[in-house]
Image: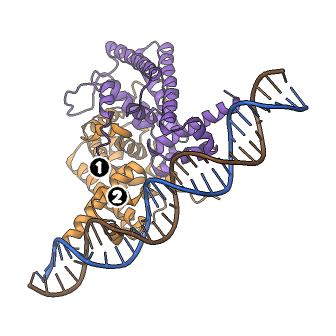
Chain colours: A purple, B orange, C blue, D brown
Amino acid sequence: MRADAARSRRRILDAARDVFLERGPDAPLDLIVRRAGVGPATLYRRYPDRESLVRDLTGDLLGRLEAAAHEAARVDDDAYAALRRFVHAAADLRMGAVIPVLLEGLVVDAELVRVRTATVHAVEALIDAAHAAGTLRPDVGMGDLVLLSIRLSRPLPGGLARLDADDTLLHHHLDLALDGLGPSPIRTAAAPARAPLSFDALVTAADRPTAAGP
Amino acid sequence: MRADAARSRRRILDAARDVFLERGPDAPLDLIVRRAGVGPATLYRRYPDRESLVRDLTGDLLGRLEAAAHEAARVDDDAYAALRRFVHAAADLRMGAVIPVLLEGLVVDAELVRVRTATVHAVEALIDAAHAAGTLRPDVGMGDLVLLSIRLSRPLPGGLARLDADDTLLHHHLDLALDGLGPSPIRTAAAPARAPLSFDALVTAADRPTAAGP
DNA sequence: GCATAGGCGGAGAGAAAGTCTCCGATTGGC
DNA sequence: GCCAATCGGAGACTTTCTCTCCGCCTATGC
């Protein structure tokens, strides 16, 4: 691939992630083109349809997420510290952009399946270790952590988005929330027993039952 | 106001809140019309332009938020419990839909100012009391709580939104996060000193510097 | 350096979506 | 039961979006 082509691809993927974050999976490609600062033809040449773009973006982000999971396991000895690091990394990547898109109806090819299962296993290892060490509430599962990361890392509506121009506030709030995941739910008054949310629960939830309209 | 007109208004406001939540403040009015199940003329007759709709919606939601703040102060003796109750109520109302819209450029009339300051004062009383009692981290302010509520109560992207069809998951995650706001940040490794985020900080952030285009 | 293949951006045609109004039918209030 | 107010749908007009053609430019190999 020529150097300028690689540069265009990078620009398009970065812009696509942000636009999908702000506008959802049906965002106009036109917006992506403009934010990337490339011509429309540049996008349509590489990606003949929307799905091929989504697929490339998903692979790109999932690959980086997998790397972050391994990095976290490698750097931190303490399981809970590693988990924290991973959740922060996922927020940095704005996984909210890709996970729902990935899960919905996208034809998942072999490479995506590989990187997805690898990531899930890496994260579940971290979670199991933290559960075993008693440093993570037993009713918190991977689904909960993923949702937390998605919810906290999505762009704020309207002008508030500016608060996240620098990611420090986001990470601070993530830290606050993570502080609530310790072993003893001290402060919760009436907490009914509850099973942790698994990753599969997310997949099931996102399985699209669309194409039902007339 | 005739009964059918009131019904239409209610339907439109409810639909508008959801659509603004999902699509942002520039969402097509067409969508609101369809979700409300009314004819286009019904919307355009009552609201000649987008701003009048936003204004009515904002007043409606802020009024309910103010009521929630007073209710929380009345029901709970413990300041932190009252604060928790209020944050949950704000999430129920999906204040994320209205606060940013309200703050941005909207011409704020006397009634909106009244209800807004009343709400802010009520909530700040709760926060001050919790700070005084030592049951709320000193570096957490109203801005933090509002952001937390906004972030956690916005609809999830794509099919994941179905997870919030019932609000229990949302409230559970909110509880987890609120558990992290206790007096002693036990688990945070390297927490730099930080001032609490005020409500005014949000207002300042959302103050739109738009109309900057060529 | 220079040739050249591959890539690039802009203009714009055609399609789709959104905005807003007119008008006959319907419905609520007295 | 009358009348005025409200309603919903059809549709004209506008804006936005999608996608392609084509002439210029730039990276790479020699």
Q: Secondary structure at mark 1?
A: loop
For disc 2, the chain is B
Q: Secondary structure at mark 2?
A: helix
Q: Amino acid at mark 1?
A: Pro
**Residue ID at (43%, 30%):** A175
- Residue A124, percent across and down? 37, 18
**Residue ID at (35%, 18%):** A135
Residue B146 is left or right of residue B79, and the answer is right
Q: Amino acid at mark 2?
A: Ile
Can you say which quadrant of the picture contains the C terminus of chain B? bottom right
Q: Which residue is mark 2?
A: B32
For disc 1, the chain is A
Q: Which residue is mark 1?
A: A214
Residue B53 is left or right of residue A36, and the answer is left
- Residue B126, percent across and down? 32, 47
**Residue ID at (59%, 40%):** A43
Marking on residue B179: none
Observer able to see residue B209: no
In the foreground, B160 or D10: D10
**Residue ID at (43%, 17%):** A118
Q: Residues within 10 Å of mark 2 (few under 14, many from 20)?
A: many
Q: Where is A6 relative to D25, above or below?
A: above
